[in-house]
Image (cartoon, rainbow, N blue to C red):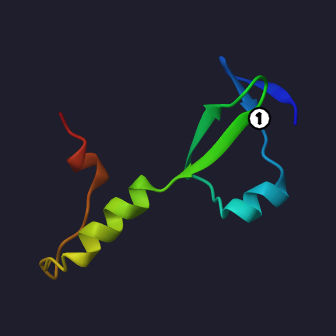
Amino acid sequence: MQVSKWGNSLAVRLPKKLVEQMGLVEGDEIDLVNGAGKTLIIKKDDRREAALAALASLNLPLPPDYKFDREEANER
């Protein structure tokens, strides 16, 4: 893998085989952990999926006309 410039940051492209093995999709969160020496450990962060599953398991009823508005939710 090659480190590339991306804006003011650096980026690494993950090989397709690794992405498929880990089941990664665009928008997934991953943790990079510094291993021994020059080794990096990549772990998929499943906290978001776990939190959404926990909320879904509550089976809270929503009004039939409920619509989530991201702009309204993020108003200050």
**Residue 1 locus on image (x, y percent):** 87, 37
**Residue furthest top in the image:** 8
Q: Which residue is mark 1?
A: 12
**Residue furthest right in the image:** 1
Local crowd at mark 1 within 10 Å, few (<14), some, or many (≥20)? few
Query: Taking 16 as reference, is 61 left or right?
Result: left
**Image-quadrant location for residue 3:** top right
**Image-quadrant location for residue 34:** top right
Which residue appears at 87% of the width and 31% of the height? 2
Pick the residue in front: 47 or 70: 47
Pick the residue in front: 7 or 13: 13
Q: Quarter of the image for the C terminus: give it.
A: top left
Query: Taking 34 as reference, is 47 left or right?
Result: left
Which residue appears at 27% of the width and 74% of the height? 56
**Residue 60 locus on image (x, y percent):** 14, 76
Q: How many marks?
A: 1
Which residue appears at 17% of the width and 77% of the height? 65
**Residue 52 locus on image (x, y percent):** 33, 64
Q: Is residue 40 above or below residue 48?
A: above
Query: Taking 12 as reference, is 24 left or right?
Result: left
Q: Is residue 22 above or below residue 45?
A: below
Query: Taking 2 as reference, is 76 left or right?
Result: left
**Residue 5 locus on image (x, y percent):** 77, 22
Which residue appears at 13% of the width and 80% of the height? 61
Pick the residue in front: 36 or 74: 36
* Disc 1 element: strand
Q: What amino acid is found at the position of numbered circle 1 in the picture?
A: Val
